[in-house]
Amino acid sequence: MKLIYSIIIPVYNRPQEMDELLASIVAQEYDGVFEVCIIEDGSKIKSKAVVEKYKSKLSIQFFDTQNTGPGASRNYGMKQATGNYFIILDSDVILPKQYLSEVNQQLETNFTDAFGGPDVAHPNFTPLQKAINYSMTSVLTTGGIRGKKKSVGKFQPRSFNMGLSKTAFEKTNGFSDMRAGEDIDLTFRLWEAGFETQLIEVAFVYHKRRNSIASFFKQTFSFGTARPKLNKKYPETAKLTYWFPSLFIIGFDLSILLLIFGYWQLAAFYVVYFILIYSDASIRNKDFRVGFLSIFTSLTQFMGYGLGFLESKIFTKKD
């Protein structure tokens, strides 16, 4: 079967990011047929003018809809798409020029009805964006679950960089109405339906993520709230490791309290850990500023996810 790709992109109030993403799609070194489906998800700041710039360079469908959230927007786009394989991207990513050719080559060699790819920091990203990317992808912070072959557990594709066949979409009905964790929910349903997934490690994207500590905290908090709901819905997938961020924050608070009373051993553990974060992030990014900021972004990530997890765990128990 010849693969015809439809790139599905929901966007909400981000015309500048859409401009950069579409420019990177134009630059793809890929000779096959593909289209771009953009779903304006009830935005107040529209991307239509940006999209018009690229209509002579790309095959684009543009849909201006009411706000329904990213999952429903992706489903709407896939229903309108003409391709037989969907590539789902967030609007805040940029594609390297070989992205589509790498995806196509891998799927022709080892076809699966769904795939996921990792994300990396672009050299032009700010130190804070690089630090956030480090915290979200490092083995020291997340176990490499977001795109490392040697990760903790089975890889679960994420919707910022994900592929899905039309067959799998029609079988599963796509994303659920969950506002967070909807991509993991879809992965579990794909596995239940007998579809195979894979990590295409070379099909990476440059992912901007959030541009402030506050917005990063809010994002990770929502990730944390989603996990107990997923555990309740799919109890066989629950793991002890999902408690680690919450335990990390409880331990961090306890270490400060113990330090006040002269017990320094637990605090020393956290000092060593953050030194490792600083050193690893600095070396990987060749920038000491990124290493320094990675201490704060990693702590923010643990706080956001851990507190969100605990709040949702209590609420889910009562539900």
Image (cartoon, helix red, strand yellow):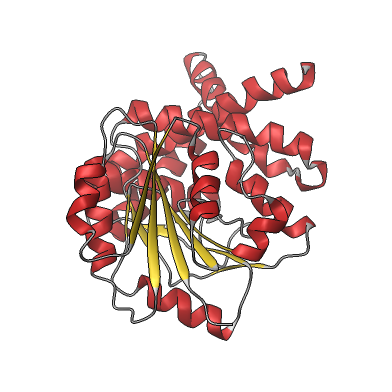
Using residue 138 as the reference point, say whether residue 239 is left or right of it: right
From the image, which quarter does the C terminus lie in?
top right
Residue 164 vs 270, above or below: the answer is below
Using residue 7 as the reference point, say whether residue 232 is left or right of it: right
Query: Which residue lies at the image location 38% right of the left edge and 80% below the top edge?
Result: 32
Q: Position of residue 243 (x, y in %)?
A: 66, 35
Q: Position of residue 90 (x, y in %)?
A: 40, 49
Residue at the far bottom in the pictured view: 109
Query: Which residue lies at the image location 70% right of the left edge and 38% below the top edge?
Result: 230
Q: Is residue 268 visible?
A: no
Query: Which residue lies at the image location 51% right of the left edge and 80% below the top edge?
Result: 106
240 and 229: which is toward the camera: 229
Residue 185: quadrant of the picture? top right
Residue at the far right in the pictured view: 236
Residue 66 vs 155, above or below: the answer is above
Query: Which residue lies at the image location 24% right of the left edge and 59% below the top edge?
Result: 55
Residue 135: quadrant of the picture? top left
Q: Position of residue 248 (x, y in %)?
A: 57, 33
Q: Position of residue 49 (x, y in %)?
A: 19, 44
Q: How many marks?
A: 0
130 and 160: which is toward the camera: 160
Residue 276 vs 67, above or below: the answer is below
Q: Is residue 7 visible?
A: yes
262 and 204: which is toward the camera: 204
From the image, which quarter does the N terminus lie in?
bottom right
